[in-house]
Image (cartoon, helix red, strand yellow):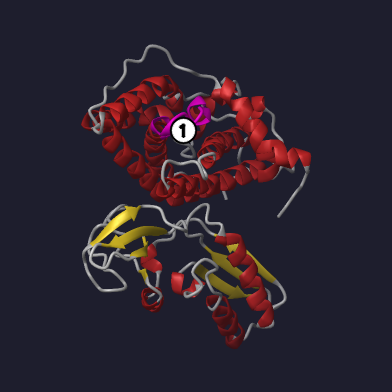
């Protein structure tokens, strides 16, 4: 394993933060998608969105469990998911945005899955055995999620006037939350230099090209970037996040250690 | 020195555990048991790989492996999860494919051709028609897709190449 004694302390902190960042993105998006259970426009989509949530939850469990191990302070995946407060979560703003209508959910899926696919494709060659393992498994899942979002984007963007209008509104609404996915600070840069992490800024051009191709084929317009929402990686979140967290953590906080 | 017989017994006990979601096949058939070893003290270590990251059957499978080994006389059992190399439907054995098909679940084609290659030659398990349509890329479990036969109109499950 990579977490050997030759690693300077600062790097263990950084590795824990990095695992939390990837894990929190997956966890929070899984939570959002699971809100569709029993509410999706058709039963096949109900099953699809919750299946995607399940894949992401599985990835989140591995990553949070690993963050807990690296942190070495006795916190497990449940402690990290259910007992951290808002400012301790380091997911991006994109994944915490409300589901909105089906178009918003699909566009958020398109943006995130294209990013996660590119990320996992690179992370497979990480020197860190656990991160490489999560990526090797997750890359197939992300590709499938991406394909699902792409099919819907084409169908709805190039569909009726109403579906086109809603898709464009969702693209415009969520676009400002995409820049943050590619921000790199010392954590990513240091770990990337050691061959452990992926510097997300290196994924930006691949992502932009893929997204622009899909949107264009779907007769949708790629928005101009006017402003960008940032702060998630530092624990500063949007208003929607508090409500999500309250629902996600309620049961565990009301009944500590509950199992079934 | 552990006897070859003990290792064989542990392997067989492990491989015979039924998949909790599709009990017509065993976890041996699915290719998710990666390694079984028995040390000098009769302690068994089993390495499994999940089919999908969030597969809810994984915990049940771990418990079932422990019980199966206990019944085979091994009291001390550790089950470890290995993520890489990632499981592929290509690891489902020929026997596993036959059992799935006999149960009306169409086994997957080769996964190596790409992630989403669902359209090619999926035959209706009921009437044998090649004229079938994808209803949903996601089915009742993480590894299934839903299809419908356009000849006999029957819906059916398909293990998606992964």
Residue sitting nearer the eye, A41 or B58: A41
Residue A164: image x %, image y %? 29, 27
Tally of numbered discs = 1
Q: Find the magenta span and give its range.
A: A93-105
**Label 1 is found on which chain of the structure?**
A
How many residues crowd mark 1 within 10 Å: few (<14), some (14–19), many (20+)? few
Left or right placement of residue A29 versus residue B68 in this view: left
Q: Quadrant of residue B96?
A: bottom left
Residue beneath disc 1: A193
Residue at image point 68% right, 44% down: A78
Question: Which quadrant of the view contains residue A210?
Answer: top left
Position in image of residue A48 (x %, y %): 43, 48
Q: Position of residue B61 (x, y in %)?
A: 58, 66
Name the chief secondary structure element in magenta. Answer: helix
User: Residue placed farthest to the front in the image?
Assistant: B153
Circle 1: element type: helix
- Camera-nearest residue between A173 and B115: A173
Q: Would residue B155 be seen by someone viewing this image from the given angle?
A: yes
Q: Position of residue A163 (x, y in %)?
A: 31, 30
In the rendered view, does A222 fall on the left or right side of A47? left
Query: Which residue is at 37% across, 47% downward?
Result: A144
């Amino acid at each position: 394993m990579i977490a050997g004694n030759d690693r300077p302390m600062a790097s263990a902190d950084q590795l824990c933060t990095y695992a939390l960042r990837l894990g929190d993105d997956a966890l929070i998006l899984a939570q959002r998608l699971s809100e569709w259970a029993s509410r999706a426009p058709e039963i096949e989509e109900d099953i699809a969105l919750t299946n995607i949530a399940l894949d992401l939850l599985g990835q989140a469990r591995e990553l949070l469990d690993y963050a807990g191990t690296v942190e070495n302070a006795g916190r497990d995946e449940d402690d990290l998911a259910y007992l951290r407060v808002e400012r301790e979560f380091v997911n991006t703003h994109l994944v915490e945005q409300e589901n909105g209508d089906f178009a918003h959910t699909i566009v958020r899926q398109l943006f995130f899955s294209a990013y996660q696919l590119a990320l996992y494709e690179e992370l497979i060659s990480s020197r860190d055995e656990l991160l490489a393992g999560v990526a090797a498994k997750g890359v197939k899942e992300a590709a499938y999620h991406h394909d699902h979002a792409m099919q819907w984007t084409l169908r709805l963007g190039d569909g009726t006037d109403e579906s086109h209008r809603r898709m464009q509104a969702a693209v415009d609404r969520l676009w400002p939350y995409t820049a943050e996915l590619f921000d790199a600070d010392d954590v990513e840069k240091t770990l990337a230099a050691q061959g452990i992490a992926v510097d997300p800024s290196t994924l930006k051009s691949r992502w932009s090209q893929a997204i622009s191709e899909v949107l264009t084929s779907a007769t949708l317009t790629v928005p101009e970037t006017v402003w960008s929402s940032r702060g998630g990686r530092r624990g500063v979140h949007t208003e929607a996040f508090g409500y999500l967290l309250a629902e996600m953590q309620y049961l565990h906080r009301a009944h500590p250690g509950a199992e079934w | 020195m552990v006897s070859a017989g003990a290792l064989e017994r542990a392997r067989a006990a492990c491989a015979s555990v039924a998949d909790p979601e599709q009990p017509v096949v065993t976890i041996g058939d699915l290719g998710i048991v990666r390694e079984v070893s028995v040390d000098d003290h009769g302690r068994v270590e089993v390495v499994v790989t999940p089919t999908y990251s969030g597969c809810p059957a994984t915990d049940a499978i771990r418990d079932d492996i422990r019980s199966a080994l206990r019944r085979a006389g091994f009291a001390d059992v550790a089950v470890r999860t290995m993520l890489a190399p990632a499981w592929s439907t290509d690891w489902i054995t020929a026997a596993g494919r036959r059992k799935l098909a006999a149960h009306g679940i169409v086994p997957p084609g080769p996964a190596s051709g790409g992630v989403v290659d669902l359209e090619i030659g999926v035959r209706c398990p009921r009437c044998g028609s090649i004229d079938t349509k994808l209803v949903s890329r996601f089915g009742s479990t993480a590894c299934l897709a839903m299809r419908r036969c356009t000849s006999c109109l029957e819906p059916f499950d398909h293990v998606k190449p992964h």
